[in-house]
Image (spheres, rainbow, N blue to C red):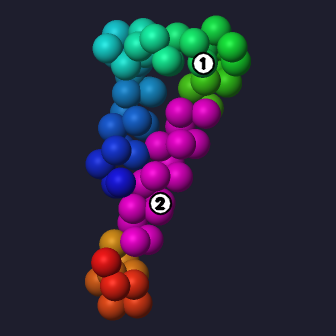
Amino acid sequence: MILIGVFIIINTISKPRYFWEHRKAVALRQWLGDRNATIIYLVLGGALLVVGVLLGVLATLNILAL
């Protein structure tokens, strides 16, 4: 999850063609606009990053058996 979150954040900021012009990204951008789509992707990436870190910490502390 951490890597996926980082991937989404980096690609949202840098906006490479393979990511930003993907048909689903284009549909979201057309529906919400570039600014709002960027916010959505950054929030999604951040959420995945935070959840991944928390799961890693919990697993390390043996609070959550994975």
**Residue found at x 40% / y 46%:** 5
Q: Is residue 30 left or right of residue 20?
A: right
Q: Could you tell me if residue 61 is visible in this image?
A: no
- Residue 61 on image: x %, y %: 34, 89
Read off the magenta span: 40-55
Task: Name the residue beneath numbered marker 1.
Answer: 28
- Residue 34 on image: x %, y %: 61, 15
Asked if the residue at tag 1 contacts the one at tag 2, i.e. Cβ–Cβ closer than 8 Å, the answer is no
Question: What amino acid is found at the position of numbered circle 1 in the picture?
Answer: Leu
Question: What amino acid is found at the position of numbered circle 2 in the picture?
Answer: Val
Task: Name the residue beneath numbered marker 2.
Answer: 50
**Residue found at x 39% / y 84%:** 64
- Residue 26 on image: x %, y %: 52, 11
Q: Residue furthest bottom?
A: 62
Towards the viewer: 58 or 16: 58
**Residue found at x 61% / y 23%:** 37
**Residue found at x 41% / y 13%:** 22
